[in-house]
Amino acid sequence: MSGRRSPETPIHETFQKFLTDKGKGDTGESGNYRRNTERELDRFHSWALGKTADPANADPATSWNGIVEAEPVTFADLDATVFGDYARYLRGSGYSHSTINTYYAYVASWCGWAHGQGYISRHYARESDAEDPLPDSDNRRPGDQQAWDSTDRDLLTRFVDAEASAAIDTFGDIEVPYDEAEDPESELWNEKIRARFEAIKLCRDRALAYLLAYTGLRAAEFLRDPNDDRPGRDGLRWRDISLKDRSATVYRKNQQWKEASLPEPVLGPLRRYKQLLDPPEEWPVFTTLHRPTLSSHVQSGLAQRGLDQDTIESVRSTWPDLLVSAEQELAAPPALTTDGARRVLQRLTDAADIDVNDDRHDYLAPHGGRRGMGEVLVREFGYAAAARYLDNSEEQVRQAYQHIEAAERADMATEALSNTDQRVNHNLP
């Protein structure tokens, strides 16, 4: 990389180049977009240098020292965590949700330009870790955002339990004579293989539903994020799970590997799924089942083994590609993506006939599972315990679940008034 595109370049030295590219007119010096962007880049730069108070990332707010010990701020100092912290700063500044997203978008546009110009290796501002603190753009109150409740969890898990159990029973009921085992000409053997694959698919969906419903994990912490190429964003691996210790090692949004808890309800579905699949330890827990993806993966893997096309087709004619990959000990197949998980949940929500009262999603969305667990933990154990479990700061949890605290304060006020105001006491139910 040339010096002109070095990550050691001070970020403020690129602002005018970016603004000229984005501004209107022959010299790029006019236009509302340019003026607004310049203002927000200056705000970001001042924040990065610690020249503004930040109640979201420092306590007290005036103790915020920025992201560097001394000037200047260079591109080498930037990553997704920095932009995530900046999103929290904006969110804690009292702006409306739409204003926060608009101000952040100006800075994110510059980050994308810098990535395209070669100053940074990734578009950090649009990675999931960076955007996670941003509010919904519809100005909904925190309590209005989707959160799975006990009825949602019950309906979803009952449905996936029934589907998986029926498929497992079907697989177990097929008895293959000893002399027909592994015989590609045996109809019973082929039926057994098909039944096993169907059971694996439904057990995978069940494990996914349970993990989302009961762990509070972010989807990007155990599924593949196609826009993030870091090792911790390519799907949770079986080697990272300890069913004995009831824990999983995940790459948290602060870019650190940490142990996450696996509550008791999750263990059974994971254990049965693993028994059926019998995967290598380096495999993702949730593999993709996208047929073209698996087909390409298996054909490429077998070709690298030196098999010709006719032999490859012969191997694939009996076994589903996922099982071929396991039986032939090929490289790990791709993990299920976060978008893929949303499609699975859309299908499950519809099939289970779950009524979702949400004007943004008509299905049980992944983030709703995490928010639902947050609701349970805050109500049962308080904000500090919920923050530790969810791997968030207590301040963030209080902000996300402020409707709970508001209701508690309302109850407190009502109780106080009932002791002093006869009319209030008379009207209580």
Image (cartoon, helix red, strand yellow):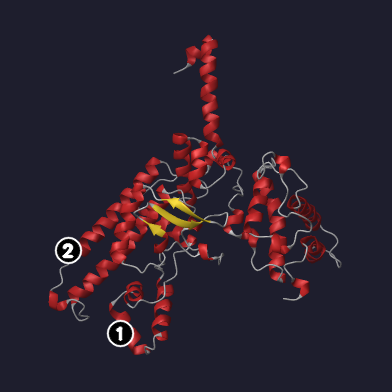
* Gap between marks 1 and 2 measured at Cα: 27 Å
Circle 1 Cα neighbour tier, 10 Å, few/some/many (<14 / 14–19 / ≥20): few
Q: Residue at x 41, y 53 (%)?
A: 247
Q: Residue at x 30, y 85 (%)?
A: 314
- Based on the displayed image, in which of its 4 quarters is residue 276 positioned? bottom left
Task: From the top left corner, tell me how far across and down residue 288 is, in percent.
Answer: 42, 67
Query: Where, quadrant-wise, is the C terminus in this rendering?
Result: top left
> Residue 173 got which mark?
2
- Kindly check if marks 1 and 2 are in contact, taking CB atoms under 8 A apart as contact: no
What kind of element bears circle 1? helix
Q: Please, what is the three-letter code of the amino acid marked with disc 1?
A: Ser
Q: Please, what is the three-letter code of the amino acid marked with disc 2?
A: Asp
> Residue 228 got which mark?
none
Task: From the top left corner, tell me how far across and down residue 299 is, in percent.
Answer: 40, 81
Task: From the top left corner, tell me how far across and down residue 139 is, in percent.
Answer: 61, 43
Say which residue label 1 marks.
Answer: 314
Q: Nearer the viewer, residue 403 or 273?
A: 273
